[in-house]
Amino acid sequence: AMCREACRVQSRGHPDQFNARIPAVSIRNSVAINQLASPRLIMTHSLWRPKVQKAIYLIRDGRDAFISYYHYQTTRRGVRMGAAQFSRLYHDRVFGDTWADHVHSWLTIGRQSIGSNLVVVKFEDLKDQPETVISQLCRFLNIQADHGRIRNAVNHSSIENARQIERLRQGEISDANASFYRQGTSQQWQNCEYQSEIDKFCQASRHALVLAGYEPTHLVDSITCDQQHLL
């Protein structure tokens, strides 16, 4: 029943209602989480935890995640910091565990621990074929939802709808990179602006990229970037 209710509320697209039914792991939410009846849905950004019995691991290309996290830590918070400085702090784990740490944790220890009870969903697949992916997840969670209901949930959960709610709360945001819902795109890591830091990321995260099913190369070559700088 909890899973069905969560799916119903998510279709409305409002983050407060979603977070109330699927709370994130935190000390502040511990009471609410403990009061939820089983089976319950809980969201977390943490590493694999041994008590997890069933999980959906949503993963994004680490190179795009790196850029998104850069803007989350800087532009969104009004912090002036170049990508090179952020990269150094990131790889020194000043901001906490890295993308590669998470991937190794969930896709090695987690996968070994619960096997088929761990379903991996790529952000890129969810973006390209949302209804298909959501249908698969509903089956995994034993949620009864027809195509119309799933389509309605997808439409209400669009990034455009999320941005509209954000504007109603905060007003217009002058810098798009400061939005919590920023771009929501794929392959932004190919932007020449980030080439040097993405190269470093690939070197440090090569094994994790392969483990997650991504090609661990930087597809933008120096010649192409040099030409763009001349334009």
Image: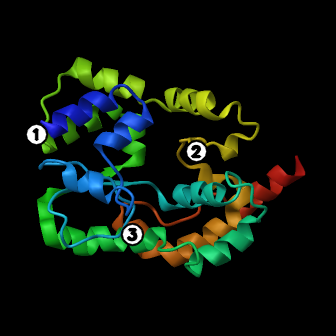
Marks 1 and 2 in Cβ contact (< 8 Å): no
Q: Secondary structure at mark 2?
A: loop
Which class describes the residues within 10 Å of circle 1: few (<14), some (14-19), or many (20+)? few
Outermost residue toward the top?
148
Q: Residues within 10 Å of mark 2 (few under 14, many from 20)?
A: some
Q: Which residue is mark 2?
A: 180
Q: Residue at x 68, y 70 (%)?
A: 86
Instruction: Give the label, 1 or 2, closer to the camera.
Output: 2
Amino acid residing under circle 2 = Phe
Say what amino acid the circle numbered 1 marks: Asn
Residue position for label 3: 102
Tell me where residue 9 sits by quadrant.
top left
N-term mark: 1 or 2: 1
Q: CA distance from mark 1 to mark 2?
A: 31 Å
Q: Position of residue 226 (x, y in %)?
A: 81, 58
With 64 as the anchor, is 118 left or right in this view? Answer: left
For image coordinates 59% across by 63% down, the residue present is: 218
Q: Residue 25 at x, y = what percent?
A: 34, 59
In the figure, is residue 1 to the left or right of 128?
left
Residue depicted at x 49% and y 61%? 62
Residue drawn where x is 13% and y is 39% of the image: 139
Tell me which amino acid carries mark 3: His
Circles 3 and 2 in contact, beta carbons < 8 Å: no
Which of the two labelled residues, at mark 3 and mark 2, occupies the earlier sequence position?
3
At numbered mark 3, what does the secondary structure look like: helix, strand or loop?
helix
Residue 19 or residue 123, whichever sits in front: 19
Task: State the image quarter where residue 220 is shown.
Answer: bottom right
Which residue corresponds to mark 1? 142
Name the outermost residue toward the right.
230
Does residue 62 lie above or below 76 as drawn? Answer: below
